[in-house]
Amino acid sequence: MTKTDLYQWTDDAKSRPPGEDSPGLNSADTWISPRHRYFCMAIPKNACTKTKLVLQQLDGLPLPLEPDRIHYRDEAGLAFLPSIADFSSAEGVEILTSPDWFRFAFARNPYARLFSAYRSQVMDLNSPYVGFRESIRQAAGYPTASGATPGRVGFADFVAYIGGQTDGQRDGHWKSQTGSLHLERIRYDFIGRVESFAVDFAGVLRRFGASPELLSSLAERVNTTPALPLAAAYGKRLADTVYAIYEEDFERFGYARDSWMFLD
C-alpha cells in the first residue's frame, strides 16, 4: 500500500462513527500515547478492557468509575488516551508506519475468543444485542410464542449465522483478528498472546518505565466471562465450522485446530 493509499484509508476511518462495523479500520479500537509513542490495537475479547485500563494508568490518567466506560472514552471530566481519529492524516500515517513508534496488540485462541464473545454479547439477555439475537432466531427458524419474552439463542446457531457473513460485516467482537489488525497496512512490533497476557504485557510496559505496582496489577482480571471448558460448547463438527471461519487466525497466530478439546 502506498503512502497515498494509507492516507485515504486513515481518512476513511476518521469519517466513520466509532465502532461502526466495516472492513476498514475501527478507530475506537486504537489507543495511542504521544508521550510514550506507542500504538495499541485493542481487539475486543482479547483482554481489551484490562489493556485499556492499564494504558490509561501508564499515562497517569484517571480511571472511569465503571471499568466498562473505558471503551467509550465518555466519562465527564476525564481525559482518555486518544484514538487515530484524534490525529491528522499525516500524523496517523506516521504512527502506523514509523520505526519511531512502537505498535502492539494481543491475539487469542479463536475458539476461546468466539465462545467468550457469544457468552458476553449474545447469551447474556441484558446485553444490547437484542436485534442481533432476533436475526439469529429468524435465520434458524426459532418458534415464536405470542407474548413471550424471547429467550436465548444457541451457540451453534450463532456460529452458523456469522458464518454466513463476510468478515467485514461482522461485529468487532467476532470479526477475525487478522481483519481487525490490518496486518497488510500496519507494521506491528509485537503481538502477544492473551494466554500469556501478564508476562507479555509486562514486557511491553517495561519499555515505557511502568511502575512495579502497575506491573503487579496485570494479574488482576476485569470484565471476565466465567470459565467453562470449551469442550462443553464445541463438538468436532462445530469446531470444524469455526476453524473454517477463522482459519487465517489459527494459522497466523499458531493455534492448533484441535485446541478446543484442551482449553478450560
Image: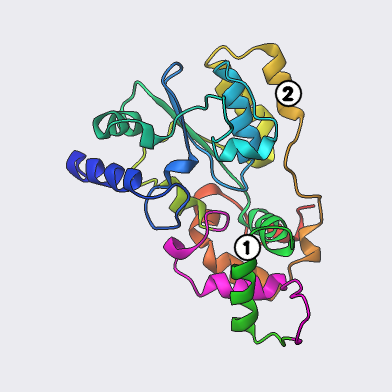
Q: Work out whether residue 213 or residue 135 is closer to the camera in this orientation and state it.
A: 135
Q: Is residue 22 visible?
A: yes
Q: Based on the displayed image, in which of its 4 quarters is residue 151 positioned?
A: bottom right
Q: Secondary structure at mark 2?
A: helix
Q: Amino acid at mark 2?
A: Ser
Q: Pointers 1 and 2 in contact (CB under 8 A)?
A: no
Q: Amino acid at mark 1?
A: Tyr
Between label 1 and label 2, give the one nearer the viewer: 1
Residue hosting label 1? 129
Classify 10 Å Cα crowding around label 2: few (below 14), some (14-19), many (20 and above). few
x, y percent for residue 217 = 73, 23
**Which region shows up in magenta?**
145-174
Q: Secondary structure at mark 1?
A: loop
The residue at the point 80 percent across, 52 percent down is 264
Q: Which mark is residue 156?
A: none
How many angstroms separate mark 1 from mark 2 (CA)? 31 Å
Q: Is residue 240 visible?
A: no
Within the magenta stretch, is there residue 151? yes
Q: Based on the displayed image, in which of its 4 quarters is residue 199 positioned?
A: top right
x, y percent for residue 171 = 52, 59
Q: Which mark is residue 217?
A: 2
